[in-house]
Image (cartoon, rainbow, N blue to C red):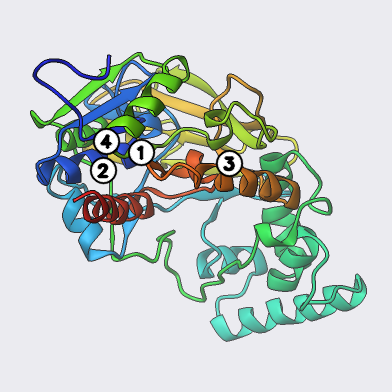
Amino acid sequence: MIKTKRFKPDIIIIGAGISGCTVANIMAENNKNVLILDKRDRIGGNCADSLMDNYYVHDYGPHIFHTSNDDVWAFVNEFTSFNNFVNSPLVKAEGNDKELFNLPFNMNLFSKFFGEYNPSKIKRIIEEDIEGSCKKYNIDKENPKNLEEQAISLVGKKIYNAFIKSYTEKQWGKSCKELDASIIKRLPLRFTFNNNYFNDYYQGIPENGYSEMLNKMIDDKKIQVRLNIDFNYCKEAILKYVKLKNIPLVYTGPIDELFDYKFGKLEWRTVKFEHELVHVPNYQGNAVINYATKDDTHTRIIEHKHFTCIFDQDIYQSNRTLISKEYSIEWKPGMEPYYPINNESNFEILQKYQEEANKNENLYLLGRLAEYRYKDMAPSIDDAIKLSWEIINYFS
């Protein structure tokens, strides 16, 4: 399973997601034989997509590539061209069923919400609300006790109630008063009429999808990919092999699963999708609409065609559209882990697993599951490139 007469790996990678594929590409470019194992039946991890009516469906939730890192942007453009999609989500506010607001928090949202168009006046309204709310509810802005106090100290009670409270409680399954303040370290307020959600220089969606981009990354004779192989069933043999041959093992799966949960299970939130094929050409007019409302149990609705069908004439070529309602739910074994729950008890468990991993000098942990932290695609690629060169320099 590990080698053939003609192929002996110089490195083994567990997981064919964006992190694993990046490492594989760098290694092959440096004349290393790479073996990738993945328990799924296709490469791409949670970035994988599929084609429907000439547009790409994000099978595991929306992925918008964005970065200001020139090296990362140059790297991904070796394998794909990007469209000019700009992420401009909308949000339904608590207590308002008649209109949608723009995100992020900017002048388009503020002008609708406060009925004022002057940035200086808007800023003063928010600052007065922050000061008044903190005084009324006895909130120490420098030392907020929970997420609710943190949010109010950053944006005031009015914005918090309308756009943050219900959405966050649905996202995490707990009252904002029970959630740690660190979850919302900052809430940027923009006093401009700019609906671009990201601040990065580069942004877009691969014109031929993420799956094709990642397949091109590993399209090399020095890379072999074995799908439908669960690492857990051959873990002992592989660990012995990499130690015997003194080659690196890059692991991108859940860190607690790697060590058979010997220190306990790390907690996650996961996402349930309800997909619906709607026989209209245009369901909601936007790729993403968030629901910051208590009565709407979903957190957002995605209409996939808007990620790749940028112009109206493209949208109406098909008289059907796929939408996905997202629900944030408690993770249980067997479900796909999405968002790590950052609290003290999980950090203590994570540290024990990291110390255990450090005992194996052939083992490298990479990616959101192995590192137990949420990571966007561009930072994941950047980390994978850096780790690749670390491995190359160490094993050369």
Residue on which the image places disc 2: 23
Q: Disc 3 marks which residue?
A: 339
Instruction: Give the label on residue 83, or none.
Output: none
Q: Residue at label 1? A: 250
Disc 1 crowd rating (10 Å Cα; few below 14, some 14-19, many 20+) is many
Q: Is residue 86 left or right of residue 61?
A: left
Confirm or deny contact between disc 4 and disc 2 (CB under 8 A).
Answer: no
Q: Nearer the viewer, residue 312 or 86?
A: 86
- Residue marked by disc 4: 210
Measured in 3D between alpha carbons, the distance from the residue under mark 1 to the one under mark 4, in whole angstroms, is: 22 Å
Q: Residues within 10 Å of mark 3 (few under 14, many from 20)?
A: many
**Distance between the alpha carbons at the discs numbered 4 and 2:** 16 Å
Give the distance between the C-alpha atoms of the residues marked 1 and 2, in whole angstroms. 9 Å
| In front: label 4 or label 3 | 3
* The N terminus sits in image quarter: top left
Q: Earlier in the sequence, mark 4 or mark 3?
A: 4
- Measuring from the top left, give residue 32's x and y in whole percent: 14, 39
Q: Amino acid at mark 1?
A: Val
The Cα atoms of the two marked residues, 4 and 3, are separated by: 21 Å
Q: Is residue 350 above or below residue 146?
A: above
Kind of element beneath mark 4: helix
Q: Specify whether 362 is left or right of 290.
A: left
The CA distance from mark 2 to mark 3 is 23 Å
Q: Residue sitting at 10 percent across and 32 percent down?
A: 220
- The residues tagged by marks 3 and 1 sit, at their Cα atoms, a distance apart of 21 Å
Helix, strand or loop status at disc 3: strand
The reply to whether the C-beta atoms of the residues labelled 1 and 4 are less than 8 Å apart is no
CA neighbours of label 4 inside 10 A, class few (<14), some (14 to 19), many (20+): many
Q: Is residue 231 above or below residue 263?
A: above
Is 226 placed above or below 24 here?
above
Amino acid marked by disc 3: Tyr
